[in-house]
Amino acid sequence: MTTLTAIVPALNEQGNIESTIDGIVPLLDKFFKDYEVLIFNDCSSDETGTLAEKLASKNKNIKVIHNPRTMGLGYNYKRGVEIATKDYIIMIPGDNEITTDSLETMFKKLGEKEIIIPYTVNVEIRLFSRRLLSKTYTWLINLLFSTNLKYFNGPVIHKRELIQTIPIQTNGFAYQTELLLKMIKSGHSYLEIGMFLKDRNSGKSKALLLKNIIRVSKSILHLFYKLNIKKDFR
Ligand SMILES: Nc1nc2c(ncn2[C@@H]2O[C@H](COP(=O)(O)OP(=O)(O)OP(=O)(O)O)[C@@H](O)[C@H]2O)c(=O)[nH]1
Ligand SMILES: [Mg+2]
C-alpha cells in the first residue's frame, strides 16, 4: 500500500470545502497506508479558512495553509509540492467538483504509468461558456505543442519524487499544463482516465476571470518559447 498527498486549493469555497473533505477522507483512509491533505486557503474573504481549521482539528492528517494574500492556483500547488511528503501527489479542487467514484478509479490505476491524467467524460455538466473555454484550450495546447491529450487541467496524479525535480514557473491556472508538457516532452509515461464532474454546489467559478485568462495566455507564450524554440524541457 502506498501513500498520498492531496493538495486542496480553496479560494472562497465556504459552501464546498466541508463536503470536499468529507467526501475524500473515507476514500483516502481506504486506499492509502498514510496520507496528508493540505488545504490552501488563498486569503479567502469568506469563511473558508475557519471551516478548514475546523476540519483540521478533527483529523491529524489535514493541514491548512493560510496565505496573507491571494497568490494564485499555481503558486499554491507549487508550495504543496514543496512541502509534500508522501509517494504520490494529487490536486483535488476545493469546490467538490470530482466524484469520489472517479477518484477511486484513478487510485486503482496508481503505479501503472508515471502520470495519471484524468479527463472529463460528462462535459455537459459545465456551462456552455466554460465548456467552450476548455475545448478551445485543449485544442490549442495540443496544436502548439504537438501533443494529443484530452484534458490538461484535471486532478492529475504525479509521483512526488519525480515532480519535485521539475521547476514550476507559473503561479496561475496553467501550472498543470506546464508540468504535463515538460514531463511528456521529457518522455515520461502517462495514462488518461475518464472522470465525472459534479455541479458546483455554491460559490463562483474562477476559471473564467479575465485576470486568470490573461495570466494563462502569458504562461502559454512563455512555454512555447521555452519548449519549442529553446528546446528546454525543464
Ligand atoms: N488557493 C487557490 N485556489 C484557487 C484559486 N483560484 C481557484 N482556486 C481553487 O481551485 C479550484 C478550481 O477553481 P474553479 O474556479 O472551480 O475552476 P475550474 O474547476 O477549472 O472551473 P469550473 O468548472 O468553473 O469550476 C477551486 O477549488 C478554487 O477554489 C487561487 O487563486 N488560489
Ligand atoms: Mg471547479
Image (cartoon, rainbow, N blue to C red):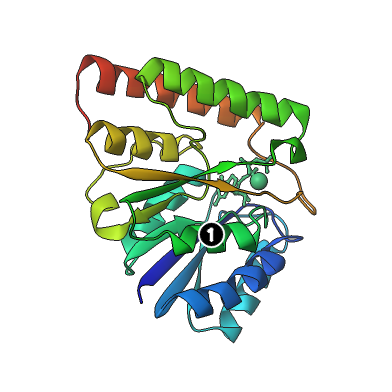
Judge whether 201 appears above or below 151 on screen.
below
Badge 1 amino acid: Thr
Judge whether 36 appears above or below 105 on screen.
below
The answer to whether residue 23 shows anywhere in this view is yes
At horizontal 66% and vertical 31% (from top left) the residue drawn is 209
The answer to whether residue 40 shows anywhere in this view is no
Residue 72 percent location from the top left of the image:
51, 43
Would you say 41 lies left or right of 203 here? Answer: left
Would you say 213 lies left or right of 122 here? Answer: left
Residue lying furthest right = 202
Residue 129 percent location from the top left of the image:
73, 26
At horizontal 36% and vertical 62% (from top left) the residue drawn is 88
Residue topped by disc 1: 105
So how many labels did they put on this image?
Answer: 1
Snapshot quadrant of residue 24: bottom right
Which of the image's four quarters has the C terminus?
top left
CB of residue at label 1: within 8 Å of ligand 1?
no
Residue 135 percent location from the top left of the image:
60, 25
